[in-house]
Amino acid sequence: MRCPKCTSIEDKVIDSRIARDGNSIRRRRECLECGHRYTTNEEFVRDTLVVVKRDGRQEPFLREKLLGAIRAACHKRPIDNEQITMLVEDVIDAVEARYDTQVPTQAIGEHVMQRLRKMDQVAYVRFASVYKEFRDVSEFVHEISSLAPGGAGATPKTKK
């Protein structure tokens, strides 16, 4: 690691801690040349995943793209960034455990919807509307009715 002040590569680690997400290590370092203290974060490098789109196209998996889609669904909902980050990590872990290097986009979407459905139903419907490409209001109504006790097809109670 190069010192950000003097660019020396001679340093020592003063303290190491596992970050909150459990997938990185935060290290406090001290430069042996100038004495400057600085912090580094180390993360493990995942194997490269390739997402297979519905039309057969392939593109590299981008964690930031998934994170952005989930953040959009959770916008102005009572879900903090740490929960979103953990959701993304859970989804990545799940697809890595099941698939080698090529992951169908459907698998990613299904894992996200599964977790959002338990976390926040409004965020779930927002994500599902984009993922399932809702074309009209009836598709929203059907998805929302599936969240109610009794699931899809349950008849709404009327007041007498």
Image: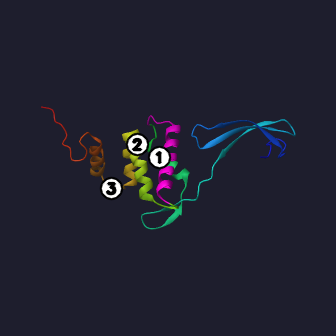
Q: CA distance from mark 3 to mark 1?
A: 20 Å
Describe residue 92's horizontal placement relative to residue 15 as left or right. left
Q: CA distance from mark 2 to mark 1?
A: 8 Å
Examine the structure image and report whether residue 79 is included in the region drawn in magenta.
yes
Which residue: 27% across, 48% down? 142
The relative height of residue 11 versus residue 55 in the rendered view (above or below) is above
Q: Which residue is mark 2?
A: 123
Instruction: Mark 3 vs mark 1: give the one in front.
Output: 1
Mark 1 belongs to which amino acid?
A: Ile
* Label whose residue precedes the other's in the sequence (2 or 1): 1
The relative height of residue 107 versus residue 22 in the rendered view (above or below) is below
Which residue: 36% across, 45% down? 125
* Label whose residue precedes the other's in the sequence (2 or 3): 2
Mark 3 belongs to which amino acid?
A: Arg
User: Residue 160 appears at what percent x and percent y?
Assistant: 12, 31
Which residue: 85% across, 43% down? 6
* Label whose residue precedes the other's in the sequence (3 or 1): 1
Labelled pair 2, 1 in contact (Cβ < 8 Å):
yes
User: Residue 85 appears at what percent x and percent y?
Assistant: 53, 42
Please, what is the dominant secondary structure of the magenta stretch?
A: helix
Pick out the residue farthest to the left.
160
Describe residue 17's horizontal placement relative to residue 101 as left or right. right
Labelled pair 3, 1 in contact (Cβ < 8 Å):
no
In the image, 29 versus 141, the foreground residue is 29
Region rendered in magenta: 77-99
Q: Secondary structure at mark 3?
A: loop
Q: Which residue is mark 1?
A: 70
Which residue: 50% across, 41% down? 84
Instruction: Mark 2 vs mark 3: give the one in front.
Output: 2
Mark 2 belongs to which amino acid?
A: Ala
Q: Residues within 10 Å of mark 3 (few under 14, many from 20)?
A: few
